[in-house]
Amino acid sequence: MNENVELINYIDVAETVYERVYENNKISNNLIVNLNRIMAEIKNQAAEKRLKLKYSSIDFEHCLSLPLADRKIKVDLSLIPHFEDREESILWLTNFIGKICEPRKMQRQKKSSLSTCEF
């Protein structure tokens, strides 16, 4: 159940990031610039949604220069879809957000003593 809650939260953040970056015309032809803008918006959303990011910043230029196996963040950035494709972009963003966020630890509720009903 915890995983479903996290996934829904990541999808919500991804949709907001997409809207704020793509629909506000913040997309350029430069992949590094786009990733930095996306990351800035993810940081804003993480603060609003109380998500904890694993990384305070990501050097995308350095990350892209390394083979996937050597990267700290195991996300294949070559799979980034064209941002005109909303659904694919949101799916990619959801996966990316999941990779860079710490999962929340859900606290279990203490079992209360059950009262019995007498009939």
Image (cartoon, rainbow, N blue to C red):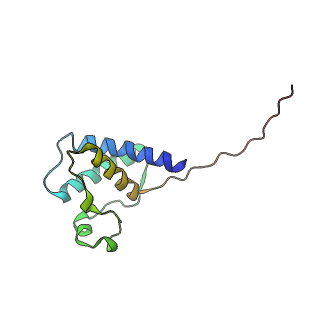
Q: Residue at x 26, y 51 (%)?
A: 38
Residue 39 spot, x, y in % from top left: 29, 54
* Count of numbered labels shown in the rendering: 0
Residue at the extreme top: 119
Residue 79 spot, x, y in % from top left: 26, 59
Towards the viewer: 42 or 12? 12
Q: Quadrant of the C terminus?
A: top right
Q: Residue at x 21, y 43 (%)?
A: 22
Does residue 28 appear to the left or right of 50 in the view shown? left
Does the rendering let one see residue 50?
Answer: no
Residue 49 falls in which quadrant of the image? top left
Up-down relation of residue 31 to residue 86 (above or below): below
Residue 109 spot, x, y in % from top left: 65, 45
Does residue 59 appear to the left or right of 102 in the view shown? left
Towards the viewer: 19 or 95? 95
Towards the viewer: 87 or 36? 87
Residue at the extreme left: 29
Q: Residue at x 20, y 50 (%)?
A: 82
Towards the viewer: 75 or 17? 75
Q: Residue at x 56, y 50 (%)?
A: 106
Does residue 1 appear to the left or right of 97 in the view shown? right
Does the rendering let one see residue 104?
Answer: yes
Residue at the extreme right: 119
